[in-house]
Image (tube, grey):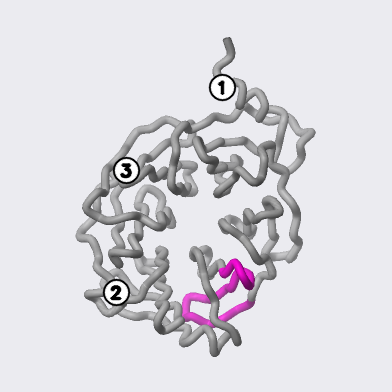
């Protein structure tokens, strides 16, 4: 009898994210009801299930896990540095950087005690720094590892002409991408200078790799070339309303579903 996992993989094999007629290698499935996940440039998968963070290699094999019960409910995972993920707990106002065993590296950072009581978003930056979105000040602030300020956008409502309501942010190649679902994706440089806004509204997830912005919204999945400004749909061989998050690493798409992460290789 064919197992459900093997049946799913047989369905995925004929498809590609870029062209459904292309032949692709067999993918794999990471079973589990995960709250969130991310990936790094090595193809590792960091999957969060309650207070437990599990690390899978590029073949879907689990090789590390750690419980973060004392940290608080994790709202974001950022693998800006491979094998050194950052976790952020918004309600507790805490950030921690983990080492390659998923243990807390150094100490947990309490943002409120260090002058940032209204930081509702956080992500990693170059040189072990962080970006924070301060909801009270409506500003993006870049800080170093000791939370000393390095850059500040000033009030975004004055800069943009409206008050953004961002859901996520990520730095890539000296640019910060701020996902504001109602308005689009706003781009800033490392000094906090506003660069432009990308007119992709309603994105429930985003990722930037190698000059390409990948987004998932209610209409489907999209590939936006940051150089040519060309927007193209991505064909995914699953019901799009079931996909909660999407990332692409090392030639494979990683799709977060209700009960699994499906890893689907791309065509060469």
- Of labels 3 and 1, earlier in sequence is 1
Is residue 209 positioned above or below 176 on the image?
above
Percent of width and height locating residue 90: 35, 64
* Picture layout, residue 124 above or below residue 138: above
Q: Position of residue 44 (x, y in %)?
A: 45, 41
**Residue 250's quadrant in the figure?**
top right
Residue shown at 41%/81% (left/top)?
Answer: 151
Judge the density around disc 1: few (<14), some (14-19), many (≥20) Cα neighbours within 10 Å.
few
Distance from disc 2 to disc 3, alpha carbons, whole Å, reads 26 Å
* Residue 54 % position (x, y): 36, 40
User: Where does the image place residue 94, in percent across and percent down from the top left?
Assistant: 29, 64
- Residue that badge 1 annotates: 4
Badge 2 or badge 1: first in the primary sequence: 1
Q: Please report the bounds of the magenta region as a residue range.
A: 180-196
Pick the front one: 243 or 197: 243
What residue would you read off at disc 2? 147
Categorize mark 3 by other alpha carbons within 10 Å: few (<14), some (14-19), many (20+).
some
Give residue 52's mark. 3
Q: Helix, strand or loop at disc 3?
A: strand
* Tag 2 and tag 3, C-beta contact below 8 Å: no
Identify the residue at image location x=61%, y=26%.
8
Name which of mark 2 and mark 3 comes first in the sequence.
3
Q: Where is the C terminus found, in terms of image quarters?
A: top right
For the residues labelled 3 and 1, the Cα–Cα distance comes to 25 Å
Between marks 2 and 1, how big is the CA–CA gap?
A: 48 Å
Q: Secondary structure at mark 1?
A: helix
Q: Between 145 and 87, which is closer to the camera in this rendering?
A: 87
């Amino acid at each position: 009898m064919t197992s459900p996992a093997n049946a799913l993989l047989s369905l995925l094999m004929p498809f590609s994210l870029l062209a459904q007629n292309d032949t692709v290698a067999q993918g794999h499935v990471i079973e589990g009801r995960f709250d969130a996940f991310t990936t790094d440039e090595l193809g590792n998968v960091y999957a969060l299930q309650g207070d437990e963070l599990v690390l899978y290699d590029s073949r879907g094999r689990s090789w590390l896990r750690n419980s973060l019960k004392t940290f608080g409910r994790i709202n974001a995972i950022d693998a800006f540095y491979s094998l050194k993920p950052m976790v952020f707990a918004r309600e507790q106002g805490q950030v921690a950087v983990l080492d390659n065993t998923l243990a807390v590296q150094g100490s947990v950072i309490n943002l409120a005690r260090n002058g940032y009581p209204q930081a509702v978003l956080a992500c990693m930056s170059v040189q072990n720094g962080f970006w924070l979105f301060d909801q009270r000040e409506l500003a993006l602030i870049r800080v170093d590892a000791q939370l000393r300020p390095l850059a500040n956008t000033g009030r975004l409502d004055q800069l943009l002409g409206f008050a953004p309501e961002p859901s996520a942010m990520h730095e890539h190649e000296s640019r910060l991408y701020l996902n504001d679902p109602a308005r689009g994706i706003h781009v800033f440089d490392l000094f906090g200078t506003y660069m432009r806004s990308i007119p992709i509204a309603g994105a429930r997830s985003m990722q930037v790799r190698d000059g390409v912005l990948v987004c998932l919204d209610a209409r489907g999945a999209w590939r936006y070339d940051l150089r040519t400004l060309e927007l193209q749909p991505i064909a995914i061989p699953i019901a799009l309303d079931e996909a909660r998050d999407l990332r692409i690493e090392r030639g494979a798409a990683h799709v977060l579903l209700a009960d699994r992460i499906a890893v689907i290789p791309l065509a060469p």
